[in-house]
Every structure is written in structure tokens, then in C-alpha cells.
Amino acid sequence: MKSRRAVRDPSPFQTLVAHFVRRIFASEDEQGTGSSGVGVGAVLAMLASPGAFASIFLLDKYSTLLQWFRGETNFNLYTASVGDEYFFVVLSMTITGLVMVLRWNRLLPDRRDFANLAILPIPIRDVFLANFTGLLGLALVFAIDVNAVSSFLFPAFVTMSDGSVSAFAHLAIAHLSAVISASIFSFFAVFALVGVLMLVLPARLFRPVSLAVRMLLVIALLGEFLSNLFLQLFSGRVPNLRDAYTRWLPSYWFLAIYEKVLGLANARMHSLAQEALAALAAAIVIAVLAYALCYRRHFLRLSESLDLVGPATRAMRIALPDSIAAHLFRSRFEHGCHSFVCKVLLRSERHMMFLGGYLGIGLLLAAQTAADSSIGRAGPRALPTSDWLALPFILSFFVITGLRFAFDMPAALAANWMFRGAIGGMRETPESMARRFMLWAVLPWELAIIGAVTAARFGWVVAFEHTATLVVASVLLIHAVLIGFRKIPFTCLMEFDTRQLLIRILCCILGLLIAVPLFASLELWMMRQPWRFCVLALLAAAAWFALKRRNQQMFLAGDAIVFEQPPAAAFELLKLT
């Protein structure tokens, strides 16, 4: 009986390993309310989905029937697959890197672990080994899970016309070698960066510096993925390898592994494959050494650390005088809500990470647009190009939509009883308070910076026209994104709704790709004949009236303010009887 129980019961070390693995998938609730996060199975399924769908989308390219219809008789499968393989390498590195960056603070023990483990008769060495074993196992699981489906479907589609098992196995081995090594490199590269920062930075600087580094990593990973998505997936080719900067992109190193295993590599790709293996080994060694050197110091100083980005008590507080606050806010309740929103955005690590990464993508797109476009002729009545006019529209679009996404991410739900008790005397609607905050977030820099830059380049007349158009577009967009908004930001418990999220993302993509260029072209058309701005005034007035009427209808149909928002029903009963 004892032997069977000994087999069933895990050892203390196995329990520690399971504990640290569960921490990676635990909820991000900063207040530790005990809410459960997304299950391990759901996370692994979501991580495997991008590679599966990307492989299915490529069936059109490698289908022999469609090739015959297109008249493609001389189709070299192996050379044509190099560009698509590069996409899978970038996809693998992006997904694994983003998971590691978003779970950065879960890679090492926190204060709760210290409180629970420090009192137990467990050596720090065992805690370190258990944590490292769990992370190493997750690295292998992520690498296999992210690439498992694509490692079967992609080689099967490419070798469809060949039909031999040997061709499929040859391509599958090359694909697995490239994408799994790229995924493991991405995992340990982020892990090594965490360890190095902990090793060289003092405790008070680690959190703010690591937060900035995480934002930069998110921007870099998403920027590389999006640029490759539009360039390679749709065109089926890889950027020119002769460019000097491409040699320093890790994604090209692991593409060289694919070509080397496949037998297509030239001398340069052989050299890049060697660099990929060396970089992979260096990332693993640096991660292990830095982790081992800083682990004990980190574990022992946990009792003095804080879970927030900044200190709990700040030496200097900036408070608006009552005379100024009375003109800026319509009530003390609105003043308190705006102060709460500012503190969440500046102190909550989760919200700072999301908003920083989202705005970073907007800056990248704006910089790319500026680099690919001309400014226009300078002069008193010279006109800018439509691409130049689109730059502030892109920035405003990302600021407004980023804030709207962030408002739905709850923070400190256990403390929203304060707002529940204070809404009795609330004179403003939640939509009006959120709208005023968004206006404060975009209008100052639109009027001061954009107006001054445009005036210095094209004169005050063009600056007035451009700034007025930008303000009108921002106001209309704010009204549009806040339709039906009936909650105080960050205080509403909102269940995850995949359908609603996909609709929002699709609307953002369409707005960025269609609405922004169209609005910039319309503005340039009006600038050529200033009387045409009357058309803008009429369109803006009609849009504002329609948005306001729609918002009033939704406000009358529901509660004035909500603190819990369940997802929409998947189906509704007709109730015919």
C-alpha cells in the first residue's frame, strides 16, 4: 500500500516544478484575487493556431490543380518554399518571444513565492533547480507546440506534387530544424536578457528598465513580423540578402539552417547557419549563467521588493490647484476618475506594456510612411503630400484606439467598491468622462506640435486647415469608439469575448488601411480649393449627429453604468409560444 502511494504522490521537487509551471499560466491579477487564468490547454491551442492557419493559406500556392489553371509548368517547389519558410521562422520567433516578454515577471519567483517557500526547509538550490527545470520544459513545449502543425502541413503541401514519403520527410526535417531552433533561441534570448538585467541593475532600477526593454522587444518582434507578413507572405519572396543590415537579423540565421539541411545553401548561407548555431549556444549559456548568478540575490531580496512599477509612496506628488481643477473638470467625481485612469496607465505594468507596445507599432508605421513618402514643396501656399498629411492621423488613430482597448482591461477589481458607492451623486455619463480624457490625450500635441511643425513648413494657413481637420477627425473617432461605453475605465469585470475582439481588430485594420489614407487624400483635395472645407463641415456635422443619436439609443436601452459585462449570447431564443 505504501509503495503505491509513493508512486502516486509527487516528490517535493516535482511539486516545485509544477508550481513554477503553473505560475507562467496564472492570472495577471496584480492584486492576487485568486482568479484563475487561461488554462494550459487553451494557451497551447492558441499558440498552435497561427502556424496551422498560415499553412492552410499557402495551399493555394502549392496546389497542383491551381498551378495548372494558372499555367505554372516550371514550378520549383524547393526554391519557392524558401520565402514561405522564412515566414514560419519569423512566426516561430515572434510567438515564442512575445510569450516570454508578456510573462517576463513570471520567469522568476515573486514575493508570494518567497512568503510561501522561505519558511519551508527547502534549500534555495532546490528552488532554483525546480524553477529552471520548469522553464526548460516550457521552452521545449512551446517550441514543439508552436511549430507542430506547420511542420506537418507545410511539408505536405509543398511535396504534394512529388508524392513520395522521402521528399516529405526531407522537407519536414529541414522545417523542424529551422523553426524549433529559432523558437528555442527566442526563448533563451529573452531569458538571458532577464538574467543580465537582474545581474547588472540595482533592485530599484530593475522594474522600470525591464519594462522599457519589454516594450522595445514587443515593438521589435511585432514590427519584424508585420513587415515580413506584408512583404513575404503576400509576395512569396524574402528581402534582399545583400543588404548589410539583414546579416544581423536572427531570422536569417535560422533560415540558413533550413537551406543547409535542404541542400540549397550557398557559401554565405553556410556561414549564417554556423552563426545561428553559435548564437543559440551563446543564448543558452548566458541564460543559465546569469540565472544562476543572480537567483540567490533575487530570492533573498524579494521581501523588500514591490509588485508595482514605481514605489508605493512617492517623494513628489503633482496636484492641480482647486481653482484650475474646477475649470478642467465638471465635478470632483470626474476629477477622481481621471486621476485614477492616469495612475493606472502610469503604474500598472500590464496596461503600460499593452499601451506602450500598441503605440510603438503606431510609431513604426508612421516612421515607415514618412520614410517612403515625400514631404512636399515648402512655401507660403505650398501643399504637403497625402502621405505627409496621414502621419498625424496614424498617431491619433493609435492613441485613441489604444486607450479604448486599454479601458476594457480591468485593474484592481477588488477596490471598485469605491466607485460603486460614489456613483449615486454622479452627474456625468461614463462615456462623457472617457471622451474628455481621450481629448486631453490627443488635442494638446495635435494643436501645439502638429500645428507648429506644419506652420513652419507650409505656413499658417495650411497649418490651420490641417490642424482643424485633424481635430475634427479625432473628435469623430472618439465618439465612434465610445458608442455604448457604460463603465468607468479599468473597473469593469469583462469576460473574454473572441467574436467582439476579432470585430474590433478587423475594424482597426480596415480603418488604418482604408479610412486614414482616404481621409488624408480628402484633406489634400480640400486644400487645393479652401471652399471645399465646407464639404468637410457638412460631413462632420452629419457624422456627429448620427453618432450622438446612436449613442443615446444605446444608453437608453441599457444600464447607466455597469461593473460586470458578460459576453453576448451565442444564440437567442425566439420565444414564439
Image (cartoon, rainbow, N blue to C red):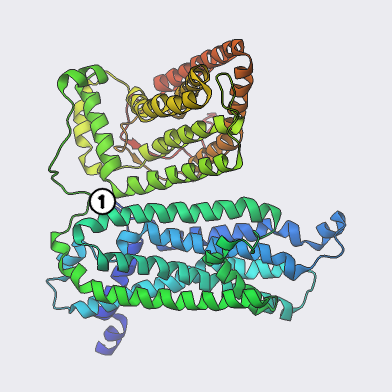
Q: With 473 as the anchor, is 71 left or right in this view?
A: right
- The residue lying at 35 percent from left, 22 percent from top is 432
* 78 left or right, relative to 364: right
Q: Position of residue 543 (x, y in %)?
A: 53, 18
Q: Position of residue 216 (x, y in %)?
A: 40, 53
Amino acid type of the residue tagged 1 in the rendering: Glu
Q: Residues within 10 Å of mark 1 (few under 14, many from 20)?
A: some
Q: Residue at x 51, y 35 (%)?
A: 394
Q: What residue would you read off at disc 1?
A: 30
For the point 29% across and 73% down, the residue is 291
x, y percentage for residue 570?
Answer: 50, 41
Is 492 drawn above or below residue 148 in the view shown? above
Q: Quadrant of residue 1?
A: bottom left
Depicted 54 relative to depicted 273: above or below: above
Which corner quadrant of the image does residue 88 belong to?
Answer: bottom right
Q: Nearer the viewer, residue 347 or 14?
A: 347
